[in-house]
Amino acid sequence: MSVKVLLAITQAFALTMSVAFLVYVVVIVVPYLRRKPAPVGDPADFTWHFFVPCRDEQTVIRETIRYLRTTFRKAHVWVVDDDSEDRTARVVRMLWRRHGGYDPYLHLVPRVRPEARTGKGDALNAAYRALNDWMGSDASRDDVVVVVVDADGRPAPNCLEVCAADHLFGDPEIGAVQLDVWMSNVETPPPSRNPVGRWFGLKLAQLQDLEFRTAIAAIQTSRGFTGTISMGGNGQFTRLTALDSIAGDAEEPWRGSLLEDFELGVHLLTAGWRTGFTPDSHVAQEGLYSLRRFLVQRTRWGQGTMQCARYLRRIWDSPHVSTLGAAEMMYYLAQPWLQLLGSLLYPIPFILLVVSTAGDPAQMWTWFTGGAWILFAIYGSFGLLPFLVWGPIYQLKCLRSRNVLRGIGLGFAYAAYIYTFYVTSWRALFRLVRGRNGWAKTRRNTEQAAGAKVALDA
């Protein structure tokens, strides 16, 4: 087989994958751009319980508890201390004893090793069992909603009334609702003495905000048509009776995957519950400034997606998931594997071109200028366009800015950002093959800054 034929085959295959993905992007962009705000409901119709899993979170937990208790005064806050090695539990107890009394809406769920530090899902299960014990067997559970919030999470003040709407928890068939996710530090550069480091850290946080508020929000919106809206690890609202239906005798609605949020959604959907998503409210969290910590986080997410492939048969056989819904979920679960395949295929045309040009520059130049360059241009355009489009959309829809040039620049930056997932997919595969399934907390920006300060002081 000649180099030109091999080049054409690999290029055609990679181009087919790119075109398919471009079509998918067009399909999800239209519903996202057309969506209008929906009516809200009355949060007094429900009882709300915030679950806050913590592992060494003393730097952020104080302000998070204060925010939740002052913003949602009638909501209970359950802080799960996963055997923290810092003062997380002490901070919670100090806040509990406010004004010489005790806060009946604040609860601490302590865990100790060897049961502790086994994953976020296990920590949430501990809170679920503690809530069951606190409520008692005779309590009404139909109007109780559990809200999972990260230790640095800030749910918007309107989130309860939005989730209480008739099309969300006002519908008894809705088992869970996911909020939109925003980054809280997109205008706050990291505390670094290096100007390049400050600029890069800020851009990385902004690109995470772009990803969640445009691409991921669009995917979730389109899943409303397939009935496969998935849950996130932050801003996840779940009806208590829905958790009961999948908890089993062990009282464990969350399972052992590193992607425990998506896993929860799979169990709810296959149990017959519907799920919802709303961009009318949001939960704010810290965007990561560090590329290293970002890669560690996304490696964990990629590995969790690979682990959830074990639910393919369950999804396919479920009478509660439509054929279109099963196809969408399988496409999502295939993403890290497609990224592995793409990382092998996409470079081949360029490598072959370089090798062939080195062997016979004149002939390859004639072939390239004779029309082959058009195929390369199309190939590159289809590879970039599905990511490039989100920059201007983010600029116009989320930032309310008409600076189109900046939006295009963000689009190119987002394309580079997305290609890091090819790296994290390989890292996830290596961890999976080596049996490294442990969960590690991503360090907060405040912890990173504190560590840097200690180093400078030393």
Image (tube, rainbow, N blue to C red):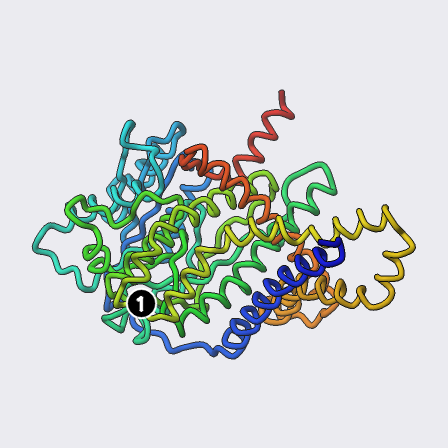
Vertically, is 79 above or below 226?
above
- Which residue is the site of mark 1? 321
Relative image position of residue 240 (x, y in whole percent): 22, 57
Is any part of residue 454 visible from this angle?
yes
**The C terminus lies in quadrant:** top right
Q: Residue at x 36, y 45 (%)?
A: 257
User: Residue 299 location, x and y as percent?
Assistant: 51, 43
Residue at the far right: name it. 362
Question: Viewed as shown, does residue 118 lie left or right of 271?
Answer: right
Which picture quadrant has residue 435?
top left
Image vertical order of residue 357 relative to residue 237, above or below: above
User: Residue 409's spot in the image, x, y percent?
Assistant: 72, 61
Q: In front: 173, or 427? A: 427
Q: Give the number of marks.
A: 1
Q: Residues within 10 Å of mark 1 (few under 14, many from 20)?
A: many
Q: Position of residue 215 (x, y in %)?
A: 54, 63
Q: Amino acid at mark 1?
A: Val
Give residue 80's quadrant in the image: top left
Q: Residue furthest front?
A: 1
| Secondary structure type for disc 1 | loop
The N terminus lies in quadrant: bottom right
Q: Considering depth in this image, is 8 or 142 the residue closer to the camera? A: 8
Is 182 placed left or right of 45 in the picture? right
Residue occupying the point 46% across, 47% down: 301
Furthest residue in direction left, as rendered? 138
Q: Classify residue 56 by image quadrant.
A: top left
Q: What residue do we see at 35% from left, 39% from top?
A: 119
Q: Nearer the viewer, residue 411 or 323?
A: 323
Q: Residue 73: in sight, yes or no?
A: no
